[in-house]
Image (cartoon, coloured by chain):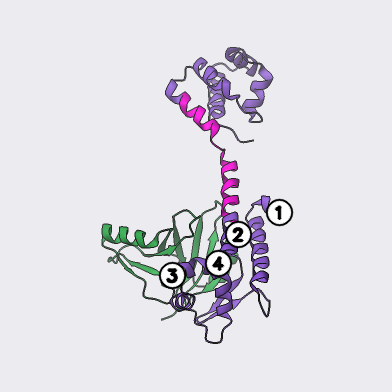
Chain colours: A purple, B green
Amino acid sequence: MSQTLFCERLCQEFESRRKRNSRFSVRAFATFLRTDHSTLSQILRGTRRVPENRIATWAKKLGIGEEEITFYLAAESAPDAAAHARHEQLRHWTAEAASITREPIHFQILELSREPNFRADCRWIAGQLSVSVDEVNIAFSRLLRLRLIAANGQNSWTDLTGIPRLTEREFLVMALARVRESAFEFGANAFLK
Amino acid sequence: MANPVLQFQILSKMPDETAQFYSSLFDWKVDAGNPMGYRQIGTGSKEGIQGGIWPAPPQAPNFVQLFVGVDDVKIFVKKAENLGAKQIIPPTILPEGDEMAVLLDPQGMSFAVWRRAAK
């Protein structure tokens, strides 16, 4: 469990009291805060959160002003950095999956790349598919990220699906599998079955 | 070969608006007349580096990437991976012959390694 902002402040306060008095113990700190020492010990070790209803009481005992207390209370309801990172990962990869599922442009680019008259020119592709160049570039980046296409020559893009007669259904199955693999590779374990 | 930062890239969910803002503010010239339709930024100065704007998907944040010049993209990708980086976009040859790869450094920041096409 990661330490919250108020927990860091408690640790800081405890250390500064210990510096002034080397015999100052967790038990003495707990008595001062009017709580039991085992709870406080777990909080200082970062294995337990400060109960939200204690933050204001303890902060006042430590002489912390109202304005600072407001920040500690707000920080308690915000997700910690690890939870935030996990949430962002989840959001990113679900959005990748949603885009692949909803936007046929990905499949259409792959289909087009197999044509003999294909030109590795995003403006030409946009014209062929009646979409904007930005839409082509966003989809092209996604296909590259998911290792579904490779651009390995000045005028050649290679479909990496390995399926000779690709259908939209087969593409979706493969693309979603790649989203899951990539998500796992980048640490979004929620996508692991 | 030294490895200077050759280019900055703004990834924007609203690339036209971003181009409009910076060209109005700094008088930068934005030219998308190339096969990628890439909005190449000319700052109008020989000092510093030039840049570009690439469209970001709606769910992505807006951010800036640095492109570091290398003489061999694949070798630097391998080197970066050995140092803990991850590949986002593998080595890719762009329509005008430039080669690039995009990586995520161990702290989670993305950057690109880039080899300009021989003129």
Q: Are marks 2 and 1 in contact (CB under 8 Å)?
A: no
Q: Nearer the viewer, residue A47 or A190?
A: A190
Q: Which residue is mark 1?
A: A192
Of badges 2 and 4, the one in the foreground is 2
- Identify the main secondary structure in magenta: helix
Amino acid tagged 4:
Phe
Badge 3: few (under 14), some or many (20 or more) residues near its Cα, within 10 Å? some
Is A176 placed above or below A121 here?
Answer: above
The span shown in magenta is A69-93
Q: Which residue is mark 4?
A: B76
User: Could you say where residue A62 lies in the image, as x and y percent from the top left?
Assistant: 51, 17
Badge 1: few (under 14), some or many (20 or more) residues near its Cα, within 10 Å? few
Secondary-structure class at tag 3: loop
Are both tags, 2 and 3, on one chain?
Answer: yes
Badge 4: few (under 14), some or many (20 or more) residues near its Cα, within 10 Å? some
Q: Are marks 3 and 4 in contact (CB under 8 Å)?
A: no
Q: Are marks 2 and 4 in contact (CB under 8 Å)?
A: no
User: Could you say where residue B13 lies in the image, as x and y percent from the top left?
Assistant: 43, 58
A113 sits to left or right of A70 = right
Badge 2: few (under 14), some or many (20 or more) residues near its Cα, within 10 Å? some
Q: Residue at x 52, y 83 (%)?
A: A118
Earlier in the chain: of badge 2 and badge 1, it is 2
Q: Residue at x 55, y 31 (%)?
A: A76
Earlier in the chain: of badge 2 and badge 3, it is 2
